[in-house]
Amino acid sequence: MDACGPLPLESGGGEKYFFSITDDFSRMVICFPPKEKSQVSEYFKANAERVLNRKIISVRCANGMEFCHNKFSKYLNDQGISCDKTNIYALG
């Protein structure tokens, strides 16, 4: 998963970032449009398993601040989700 932005133009709803999740098994890509990069972890919590329709057991994410803060790491740990962090530009 990765987050990108700010983009040069906002969407009609004011979003200027996008957050993508790629399912390694199916290669399905899902994008969410948060208004701020700080909302990425909340989008993940609220939508990832529901949209993918399966239990998430592992995530691979860029080593950016939106994924590395203690609250998100604690959430993943509490859910039993392992997290592999890559170099910041390795997923692009």
Image (cartoon, helix red, strand yellow):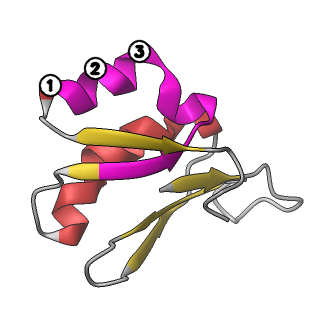
Q: Are marks 3 and 2 in contact (CB under 8 Å)?
A: yes
Residues at marks 1 and 2 touching, judged by CB atoms closer than 8 Å: yes
- Alpha carbon separation for disc pair 1 and 3: 12 Å
Q: Is residue 62 magenta?
A: yes
Going by the numbered disc 3, the residue's amino acid type is Asn
Mark 3–mark 2 Cα distance, whole angstroms, equals 6 Å
Compared with 85, 32 (above or below) is below
Residue lying at 35% horizontally and 25% vertically, measured from the top left: 73
Residue 35 relative to residue 59: left or right? right
Packing grade of label 1 (10 A; few <14, some 14-19, many >=20) is few
Identify the residue under disc 1: 78
Q: Secondary structure at mark 2?
A: helix
Q: Position of residue 63 (x, y in %)?
A: 58, 37
Q: Amino acid at mark 2?
A: Lys
Q: What SS does tag 3 mark?
A: helix
Q: Which amino acid does the dot numbered 1 rest on?
A: Asp
Which mark is on residue 74? 2
- Residue 27 vertical placement versus 48 (above, below): below
Figure quadrant of residue 50 = bottom left
10 Å neighbourhood of mark 3: few (<14), some, or many (≥20)? few
The span picked out in magenta is: 59-77
Q: CA distance from mark 1 to mark 2?
A: 6 Å
Q: Identify whether 23 is placed above or below 68.
A: below
Q: Residue at x 28, y 55 (%)?
A: 47
Rendering coords of residue 30 (x, y %): 42, 72
Disc 1 element: helix
Tell me the number on the disc at residue 70. 3
Q: Position of residue 88 (x, y in %)?
A: 68, 44
